[in-house]
Amino acid sequence: MNPPPTTVGQATRSPAPLGTAAHAVLHEATPPTEAPASAEPAPVAGPATETATGTGGRTTLAGSVTETTADAGGRTTIAGPATETTADAGGRTAHSPGPAGRGMRAEAAVETAAGAGGRTAHSPGPAGRGMRAEAAVETAAGAGGRTVIERLASAPPLTLRQTGPHTVHLISTAAGPLGGDRLRLDLRVAPGTTLELGSVAATLVLPGDGPSMMLITAHVGAEATLRYVPEPTVLAARSDHRLRVRLTLEPGATVLWREEIVFGRHGEPSGRCHARFDATCDGVPLLRQEFTVGDPGLDGSPAVYGSARCVGTTFLTERAPAPAVAEGVAVLPLAAPGTLVSALADDAVQLRARLEWGERQAMPAPPTGDDSVAYGGEAASPGIG
């Protein structure tokens, strides 16, 4: 449910074994295994740059490594830098030191290829394999009870930037996920700390060679707070995506977890997505949910999505006092402490408004001056007024 953190900062290739299933429990996704560590670059003094000729005639720049090669199909492969940071004793952000006191060592890889019409796309690896990338955020309790972002580890397209005292945003540094990609995000919120994670733009899922996979694991410590509120995920036509969320809570943890999915870009049919969400608190299940988007036999049914172009859910540990239903949105208190808000809408703006209305039915009034993205607007009714 919540495997330990893995080595982050390096992108490798992984096969895409998962098949497609609609409204059925899939086998749990196997967390990706660690990739072997790459050779450590030679140290570079000051601002100087060193180059050397590696195998195959590639040029290697010591320190920040950039390699380019051409494969049999004429595609260009580019390996670029990754980012990993830690908080030092004074709470300042610093590079993560390497083994035995050596300097920072971080690597990532991005591969591109020319697609139809000259567009840039990920380059599939041997036997149709896609990109593999991992990212992680960890918090720690600092002096005076404040939250310190102790660790940020990124690899394109999962790149993280701290944007506030306890706020982190995902930014796009590569196209993805594409078919065949395997991406993983690990969140660890220490007891008594707060983490809010958003994104600067929507995530566009693109077609490729096989299904893409996004696995998110999150562990929220006792009396800690996590607000996970990214921008919507857009399923481009012909894409095939798997989204897995594994959320583990300790007693007293507070969570708001929002997911929004848009059925294709403007004027195009939706791609496929199978999403599964598993939440437990102190070993007791809170919520097990899964749904499928992009099945023609289901999407147009009045009992499923009807004419809607977006679907969204929010899981909260706060418990709504009673069920509530309005146009396009339902608020359902769970058996264990918690609430599930579900909404359908014609567009992403309307979907967000309906979800926020539902969230306010369960959440207490925001603290004075709280302008976090978890509290969005003060509309008295769902939808656009």
Image (cartoon, grey):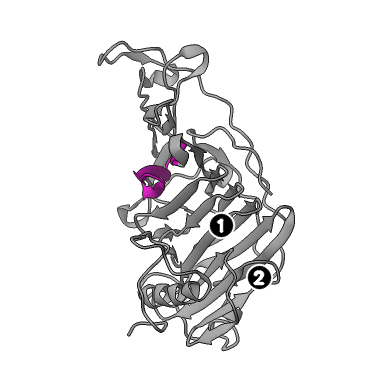
- Mark number displayed over residue 254: 1
| Circle nearer the viewer, 2 or 1 | 1
N-terminal label among 2 and 1: 2
Pointers 2 and 1 in contact (C-beta within 8 Å): no
> Would residue 117 be visible to someone looking at this image?
yes
| Image location (x, y in percent) of residue 159 | 41, 43
Q: Secondary structure at mark 1?
A: strand
Kindly identify which residue carries mark 2: 22
Instruction: Indicate whether residue 153 is drawn in magenta.
Output: yes
Which picture quadrant has residue 192? Answer: top right
| Image location (x, y in percent) of residue 121 | 39, 50
Check the picture and name the quadrant holding the C terminus: bottom left
Residue in view at x 25 percent, y 16 percent: 47
Classed neighbour count for the residue bearing mark 2: other residues with Cα under 10 Å, few (<14), some (14–19), many (≥20): some
Position of 51 relative to 118 (above/below): above
Q: Main secondary structure of the magenta part?
A: strand
Direction from residue 34 to residue 116 in the image, left or right: left
> Would residue 153 be visible to someone looking at this image?
no
Residue in view at x 53 percent, y 68 percent: 314
- Residue range corresponding to the magenta coloring: 146-173
